[in-house]
Image (cartoon, rainbow, N blue to C red):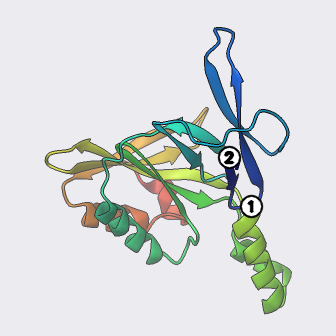
Amino acid sequence: MPIIHTNRKADKYYLHQSTTKKGNPRYYFSRSAAGNLVETIPQGYEVYENPNTQVFLRKKMPQLISEAEIAIIEDNLKRNESVKDCKIDVRETTLTIHVPDQEVSDVKAFGLDPQMNAVLKKFLAETGTYSPMMRFKLIDETERIFAVERYVFRGEGWWLPLGSGKDLQNLSKKYCQHLGKESFFELIF
C-alpha cells in the first residue's frame, strides 16, 4: 500500500522515490499516483504539511517547545476576536503563528445571508492561504526564555524583535492580542 497523505484541501499526495545523479534515493510528494511509489516512510523521516498545505517528506526534527507551551499560545489566540483559524507551525525552537490572508468578515460587506457566510467560511478553511505574522523563539532551553518577533512587510520582509522573558503566558497575552489589528503594525521593541 503506497504512502498517501490527504492535506487540508482534501488533495491526495503520493510519496514517490527517484535517485539523484550520485545514485542516492530522493523522496517527494506528487498528486500523481503513477510512478515509483513508496510503501513505507524511510526511517528518521516524517510527513510534513505546512500551513499552506504543501506536503513534504522531511527529516524528523526535535520539538523543543512543549505541548503545554503550545497550549498557552493557542489559548491566548482563542481570546483574540480579530483573527480566527490561525495555524501554528512548530519547528525545533520556533513556534510561528500564521494568520489567514482572507477572513469571512472581509466579505460581510457584500451582504451575504448567514447560510452563504457559513459556506464561505468552510471554503476559506479548506482553500485559504496563511502568512507568518508572529513567532516565539525558545532562546534558553534551561530557563525556558522566549523571544517574540513580528513580521515586517518592508522590502523582502524580516522579523522584528519585540521582547523576551521567562513568562510565556504574559508574553503571549501581551503580543497575541495585536494579531489582526492595526496595533500589530505599531509594535516595536
Is disc 1 in contact with disc 2, using a CB cutoff of under 8 Å?
Answer: no
Q: In the drawing, does residue 27 fall left or right of residue 92?
A: right
- Where does the image place residue 155, in percent across and percent down from the top left? 61, 33
Q: Toward the viewer: 187 or 157?
A: 157
Q: Between disc 1 and disc 2, whose residue precedes?
A: 1
- Where does the image place residue 174, in percent across and percent down from the top left? 33, 65
| Labels in figure, total | 2
Which residue is outermost to the front? 1
Q: Quadrant of residue 93?
A: top left
Q: Secondary structure at mark 2?
A: loop
Residue that appears at 14% across and 48% down: 143
Q: Secondary structure at mark 1?
A: loop
Residue that appears at 48% across and 62% down: 183
Q: Amino acid at mark 2?
A: Gln
Q: Work out whether 18 lies above or below 120.
A: above
Q: Which mark is residue 54?
A: 2
Q: Which residue is mark 1?
A: 9
Q: Amino acid at mark 1?
A: Lys
